[in-house]
Amino acid sequence: MAAGSEHGLKGVVWQRLKETIIEDCKKSEIWKILILDHFTTKLLSSCCDMHNLMKQGITIVEDLFKSREPVLEMKAIYFITPTAKSVEAFTSDFEVKPKYKAAYVYFTDYCSDELFNKMKRCCGKYIRICKEINISFLPQESQVFTCDNPGAFYSIYSPHSGRNKEKTLETLAAQIVTLCATLDEYPGIRYRKETVFDNTTLDNAKQLAVLVDAKLAQHYEMDDNGKKKGKTQAQLLILERGFDPVTPILHELTYQAMAYDLVPIKNNTYIYKSKEGLEKEALLNENDELWVKLRHMHIAEVTEQIPKLVKELAANKKQPDNKTTISQLSQLMKKMPHIRKQVAQKTVHLNLTEDCMNHFQKSVEKLCKAEQDLAVGSDVEGQRVKDPMRTLLPVLLHPHETYDKIRAVLLYIFSINGTTEENLNKLIQHVKIEEDREFILNWKELGVPIISSPSLFPQRRSSRRDRSQEETYNLSRWIPIMKDIMEDAVENKLDTKEWPHQSESPAAWNGSGAVSARQKHKASSQDERRSGSRLIIFVIGGISYSEMRCAYQVTQSVKSCEVIIGSSHILTPVKLLEDIQALSKPATTTETFTIQIE
């Protein structure tokens, strides 16, 4: 694994898997088969590769749901989720005729008595080990996790989801608890106060906080050897997606956020064409050291960095710096095998940067100024935007893509805290989405005002931190509200009325700033108490790449506190709009279990 994967969440998860699954199985000298379901495949792929598994004595990795040939002389490790679908697939391997010599079963989380008894009844004599290892989240990056559940958005916010909402919140709570357990943290919990909107109370954050608090208490009571675990130096904040509708809709110009918005990247895989016209794939993850270095930079800085990297390669081959091209890099790869990996990474990012800039110059640049003025509420000179409609109009008159116009209209509505029904109908007609008005109307399900109402306060937004002295690019003046929240939390400045405590936090997070009289230097006392502490943030309804970036920025600036951010899933602007539109559609049926035969 590259340096980026060895530290943070991914490193912690891999270490935990080695200490449980791998160490258990090492006691037997027979090499083994590892069988995974969909979730555990993603989990294992996120923190290790086949080389790591081979070193641990695992020779074959198989899909639980695909037809497999029996290997009776080998023992199989089943690393699966405790669901009826996965358990059914497991028992089918042993019920009629066993496929393996024995089974070592590891569940990501708590397995119900019903499922456990089914396993015991059907194939108990083949099971050598059955354990729950308490890892049911995905470590997406060193400081980012998800619950791998994009469907949670619909379940929680759709009026058609029925009782799925309560089940989903229960599941998310259990997954958050496994994150805390993996990090060996017992945090104090706070949540963003419920929103009362249109005679409806959105209190999902409070509900989730209550569930997490109860499950954490239960986990540490059960887990500890007769001694109850006390609170650790950590704080967990829970909030809903509606807290900041602007950030996930804006066109972002930092490299990672921009690439995932403008370029068709699926499953973190970027597909591009070489100069020879061959289609190539590149995985954008923390094994790519250059990606880790560039991902949070502004695209203007990335475009400056890339030529420097090309010049380094050109110097190695004594080529004229200003004439190095992608085709010449390709030649370098053939002639210099020892730098092939470095050149490959640089070639990938040359192509990806070029893709981003092509989109930017084609249409995004024209959008950004209007978007920034609407989001920030002032122009580049700091003059207040008095008439947001005048800012929006040029975007509507230009032949931009429909999605881009929808995004601009939403930013306009957010900027004025909701518009009149008459004005909204005109905007919908102008963008020509009369049949798809849910793209805009359904934001109300998140507690975001779309139609203005006299019952609402004239100003709904929380006060923002003063960043007038910070240097920003003209087309990147908006700072995600998440960064304010992170910094306020670390500095103990969160308003207790807006952020009630579900469970009290330890001294380092108590908000009083109280310090022991024995500490000599009052100014540094908070850092001393906070040293090695964690701030964990969970957003119900998805996080954006911009908000992920904030976790790294605040950790870097504070140093005494690591910020970890997570959600049910990661958002891109277009995917969020599609999810918003789908909220008014009837719920779909659940999938059934089938074995795939290849």
Image: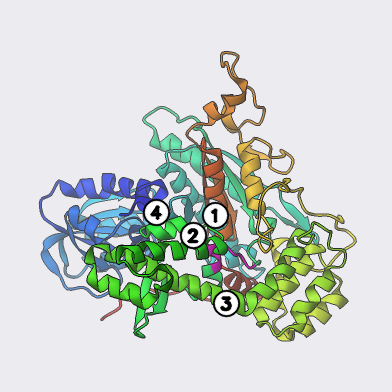
Decide which of 171, 230 is in the foreground and name it.
230
Q: SS of the residue at dot 2?
A: loop
Q: Which residue is mark 2?
A: 295
Q: Which residue is mark 1?
A: 549
Mark 1: few/some/many CA within 10 Å (<14, 14-19, 20+) = many
Q: SS of the residue at dot 1?
A: helix
Residue 349 shows up from this direction: yes
Left or right: 306 as drawn, with respect to 453? left
Q: Give yes or no for residue 97 being in the magenta stretch.
A: no
Q: CA distance from mark 1 to mark 3?
A: 22 Å
User: Callout 2, which amino acid?
Assistant: Arg
Mark 4: few/some/many CA within 10 Å (<14, 14-19, 20+) = few
Decide which of 286, 208 is in the foreground and name it.
286
At which x and y percent is residue 475? 67, 64
**x 36%, y 74%: residue:** 281
Left or right: 387 as drawn, with respect to 574? right
Q: Which residue is mark 3?
A: 359
Give the mark toward the camera: 1 or 4: 1
N-terminal of the pair, mark 1 or mark 4, is: 4
Q: Determine which of the numbered discs, if any, sits on residue 112 in the image.
A: 4
At which x and y percent is residue 465? 72, 46
**x 34%, y 72%: residue:** 329
Given contact means CB atoms under 8 Å apart, are the residues at marks 2 and 1 in contact?
yes
User: Callout 1, which amino acid?
Assistant: Arg
